[in-house]
Amino acid sequence: MTRRFGAAVLRSYGSPFTVEDVLLDAGPAVGEILVRVAGCGMCRTDLAVRRSGGRSPLPAVLGHEGAGVVVETGGPDTGLVVGDHVVLSFDSCGHCRFCLNAAPAYCESFASLNLFGGRAENAARFRDAAGGGLAPRWFGQSSFAEYAMVPARNAVRVDPALPVELLGPLGCGFLTGAGAVLNS
Ligand SMILES: [Zn+2]
Ligand SMILES: [Zn+2]
């Protein structure tokens, strides 16, 4: 089933984000989840891409502080079920020495997974309404959109009693600030 939904697309450096329809052709692969995004923070890193003059591939759906509700899962290994509320964070490989030492922020594949190439096995997940390609998902999520297809590794289940539409910045801004305070 192809899903069609709205997303904020950055088409060229220095230009505004444009809200347009995008297409997602398949459901989650094994280990992925599909999340209906309830809210997303706007982080300095998203804005830096607009000024980056060619370092990150465009056109792209940015957004890397998303939170929402799981609507589909790629199997029981995700550890999540439909209806779970989740906060989304950065992607990590899960098998390098840093990931295996519980330090996924230092993943050896951090830059390629989050900034430049996405996951080789599931790289391009979206296309635009005209069928044109969009860059691989940003930070494993591309959550400036109504839906985000995410490796379950990036998703943290949260209490459904909390206002999920406000929780997204826990996935980057608050995480980064707390890390500085608690670790340094
Ligand atoms: Zn950020
Ligand atoms: Zn890793």
Image: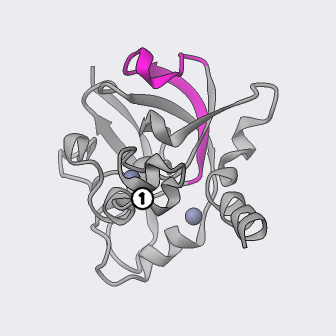
Q: In the rendered image, which residue does mark 1 sit on?
A: 107
Look at the image and tell me in which quarter the N terminus lies: top left
Q: Which is nearer the eye, 108 or 61? A: 108
Q: Which element carries disc 1, helix, strand or loop?
A: loop
**Crowdedness of circle 1 by 10 Å Cα count: few (<14), some, many (20+)?**
many
Residue at 58% from the left image edge and 73% from the top image edge: 44
Give percent across and percent down for residue 146.
50, 39
Q: Is residue 74 above or below residue 150?
A: above
- Report the span colored magenta: 65-83
Question: In the figure, residue 82 lies in which quadrant?
Answer: top right
Residue at 77% from the left image edge and 64% from the top image edge: 182
Task: Verify whether residue 50 appears in magenta.
Answer: no
Task: Verify whether residue 73 appears in magenta.
Answer: yes
Instruction: Report whether 134 appears left or right of 37.
Output: left
Q: Is residue 76 visible?
A: yes
Question: In the figure, residue 74 lies in which quadrant?
Answer: top left
Give percent across and percent down for residue 151.
41, 37
Residue at 45% from the left image edge and 24% from the top image edge: 78
Q: Which is nearer the eye, 34 or 178? A: 178
Instruction: Report whether 161 appears left or right of 71.
Output: right
Circle 1: residue type:
Cys
Q: Is mark 1 within 8 Å of ligand 2?
A: yes
